[in-house]
Amino acid sequence: MATYTVLFVCVENAGRSQMAEAFFRKYAPDDYDVASAGTKHVSEINPIVVKAMSQIGIDISKQKPKELSEDMIRDATKIINMGCMDKNFCPTLFIKKVEDWNIEDPKGKPLDKVEEIRNEIENRVREMIFGLSRENKEG
C-alpha cells in the first residue's frame, strides 16, 4: 500500500502530466504512488510526447488520458499542476492547495521543444522525489 500519492494534473492529460507520471514511476521508491489526470477529456496522448519519451527508453504509448475526479483529488497527498494555458479548464480553478510548476504545454510544438519540456519535467520530478525522501527521513 502506498504511503504517499502524487497527482499530476494538466488540462488534457495528454503531455506534461503523462511525462511527469512516467518519470515519477521510474524514480520514486516503491511505497510512493502516482497518478495523472486532466480537466478536459481528449482521446489520446500527444504522439510527439510519446516519441520524446521513447527516445529515452520510456514507453507511454499505451497510456490513456484520464479525467480528473474527486476521488483522485481526495486520495492525493500532493497535487502538482503542470501549468495552465487554457483558463477555462485550468486545474487550479477546481483544486485547492495545489503546487503549480508552470511548465509550457508541448501541444503543437516541434520535437526539439518537446524534448526541452521533457527534460525540465524530468528534472523537476527528480528534485521533488529527492525532497520527499529527505522529508520522510527527517520527519
Image (cartoon, grey):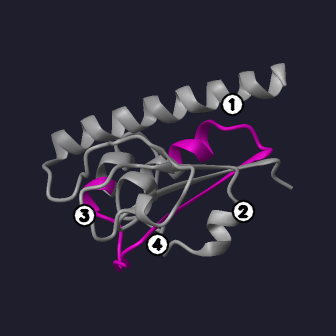
Question: Quick check: 82 left or right of 21?
Answer: left
Using the image, tell me which numbered label, if any, was put on residue 86. Answer: 3
Q: Residue 50: give x, y in percent of width and height.
A: 34, 57
| Mark 2 or 4: the one toward you | 2
Instruction: Say whether disc 1 or disc 4 marks the residue closer to the N-terminus.
Output: 4
From mark 1 to mark 4, how far is it between C-alphas? 27 Å
Return the residue nearer the eye: 93 or 14: 93
Name the image quarter holding residue 120. Answer: top left
Q: How many labels does the image show?
A: 4
Disc 1, SS: helix
Residue occupying image coordinates x 73% and y 27%: 133
User: On the image, numbered disc 4 is attached to which residue?
Assistant: 64
In this figure, which residue is indicated by the disc labeled 1? 132
Number of the label disc, if any, that sits on residue 75:
2
Left or right of residue 91: residue 71: right
Tag 3–tag 4 contact (CB < 8 Å): no
Q: What stretch is highlighted in magenta?
A: 22-49
Q: Distance between the residues labelled 2 and 4?
A: 20 Å
Task: Estimate the x, y position of residue 2 in percent, counting from the top left.
Answer: 81, 52
Q: Are marks 1 and 3 in contact (CB under 8 Å)?
A: no
Does label 2 or label 1 sit earlier along the sequence?
2
Label 2 neighbourhood size at 10 Å, few (<14), some (14-19), many (20+)? few
- The reply to whether the C-beta atoms of the residues labelled 2 and 1 are less than 8 Å apart is no
Tag on residue 2? none
Counting residues from the start of the chain, the first of labels 3 and 2 encountered is: 2
Label 1 crowd bin: few (<14), some (14–19), many (20+), radius 10 Å: some
